[in-house]
Image: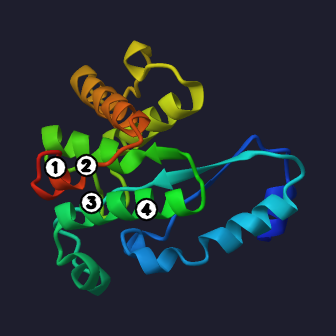
Amino acid sequence: RDEMTLKEIIQDDEWDLITVQQASPVRGVPDTYNHLKDLMDYVRKTARKPFRFAFHETWAYSKNYVRKVYEENYQFRPIIMYQAILNTVWQETKKVAINDIIPCGVSIQRARALLGDSLNRDGFHLEKNYGRYVAACTWYEFLTGKNVLDNPYYPPTITPTLAFVAQKSAHEGMEWQKRKFIETKSFINGEFF
């Protein structure tokens, strides 16, 4: 179908897991999460069976992204956006008792530390080969509980080296998330970039 309402999507299947995420320009702005609990209440009430929530933590924009909202909220600086996303996601998910975070933002940032600021094709959408593969590896570990470093698959459009960087970045992101603790000081000092 071309169009479905939120209610139709929720009731389309008996979901075990439903994920939520914040719109990209404001993902690091805490007061934009003030309706998250209302959304979660609606989803719980509408779902066909009990399920668990997870939050998809997305990534910071690249440094060459130049829209006004990026300047207003993050001064055109990926590290400021990244830190804001981490702090906000951890703070806001704790308020609504979402215990599972899919840390794509952390995984992408780890890959940036190794590959440079090349994981976005247009400043905010992930690059179609290795950028998306980093996110896919993160979801793989989250959904299966298996270490992605043990998975021999990678797309034929990337090199074995890029595949390893993507898998390692995703694995490190998941390991970091499992600690369920954010040490803000280390992020502000840039130690995790």
Q: Quadrant of the N terminus?
A: bottom right
Spatial separation of the CA atoms under disc 1 and disc 2: 6 Å
Q: Is residue 71 left or right of residue 157?
A: left
The residue that disc 2 covers is 183
Q: Earlier in the sequence, mark 3 or mark 4?
A: 3
Residue 78, located in which quarter of the rendered image? bottom left
Above or below residue 128? Residue 154 is above
CB under 8 Å between discs 1 and 3: no
Query: Badge 4: how crowded within 10 Å, few (<14), some, or many (20+)?
Result: few
Where in the figure is residue 31, as x and y percent of width and height? 45, 80
User: Looking at the image, is mark 3 or mark 2 earlier in the sequence?
Assistant: 3
Question: Are discs 1 and 2 less than 8 Å apart at CB?
Answer: yes
Amino acid type at image mark 1: Ser
Q: Which mark is residue 91?
A: 4
C-alpha distance separating marks 1 and 3: 13 Å
Q: Which residue is mark 3?
A: 82
Q: Mark 1 = which residue?
A: 186
Q: Report crowding for label 1: few under 14, some 14 to 19, many 20 or more residues within 10 A (C-alpha).
A: few
> Contact, CB < 8 Å: mark 4 with mark 2?
no
Which of label 3 and label 2 is nearer to you? 2
Q: CA distance from mark 4 to mark 1?
A: 17 Å
Q: Is residue 174 left or right of residue 56?
A: left
The answer to whether residue 123 of the structure is visible from this angle is no
Of mark 1 and mark 3, the one earlier in the sequence is 3
Q: Give me the residue at 58% from left, 25% from top.
A: 144
